Image (tube, helix red, strand yellow):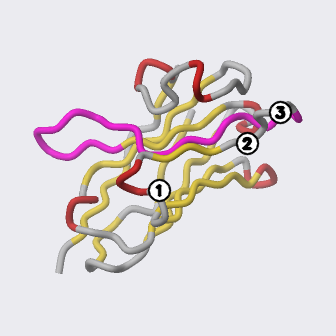
Amino acid sequence: QLVESGGGLVQPGGSLRLSCAASGFILRTYGIGWFRQAPGKEREGIACISGNDGSTYDSSTYYRDSVKGRFTISRDNAENTVYLQMNSLKPDDTAVYYCAADGRAPRPYTSYDPLGVREYDFWGQGTQVTVSS
């Protein structure tokens, strides 16, 4: 099970840190993606981090262009949690944010769509982020 938290209301230019906590399994071996879905729009992937297995692609990260330089994905294995630090938030970032897990081994991002919803096996319930003054 994945559980997201940390969403809320923030002013433009502000920051939030979202958490994706795992229960019942060891998160570090899974690739984790963060997605968001705004009203009337399709769910889109925004960031991902590959599993932590000591391979060449261990914990590599990938971001959608619209969030590069503003959002940072990271993992804390001791906490069995993946985070999404979001800075310089804009009203367009308003959405429900989801994390999802990919059980396959880390692999080059050129070999698949790392932000594609079909690449992920199970999902959290989502947390609302609203950016508004």
Residue 117 % position (x, y): 41, 25
Q: Are the residues at dot 2 and dot 3 in contact (C-beta closer than 8 Å)?
A: no
| Sequence-first tag of 3 and 1 | 1
- Residue 129 location, quadrant: bottom left
Q: Which residue shows up at 78% across the image and 37% down it?
A: 58
Q: Are the residues at dot 1 and dot 2 in contact (C-beta closer than 8 Å)?
A: no
The residue that disc 2 covers is: 59
From this view, report whether residue 70 is shown above or below residue 120. Answer: below
Q: Which quadrant does the N terminus fall into? A: top right
Of tags 1 and 2, which is closer to the observer?
A: 2
Label 1 SS: strand
The numbered mark at residue 56 is 3
Q: Is 46 left or right of 40, judged from the image as shown?
A: right
Dot 1 alpha-carbon crowd within 10 angstroms: few under 14, some 14 to 19, many 20 or more: some
- Residue 72 location, quadrant: bottom right
Q: Which residue shows up at 43% across the image and 18% down it?
A: 118
Label 3 SS: loop
The residue that disc 1 covers is: 5
Residue reaching furthest to the left: 40
From this view, report whether residue 102 is shown above or below residue 4. Answer: above
Dot 2 alpha-carbon crowd within 10 angstroms: few under 14, some 14 to 19, many 20 or more: many
As measured in the structure, the alpha-carbon distance from the residue carrying label 1 to the one carrying label 2 is 22 Å
Q: Which residues are magenta?
A: 36-54
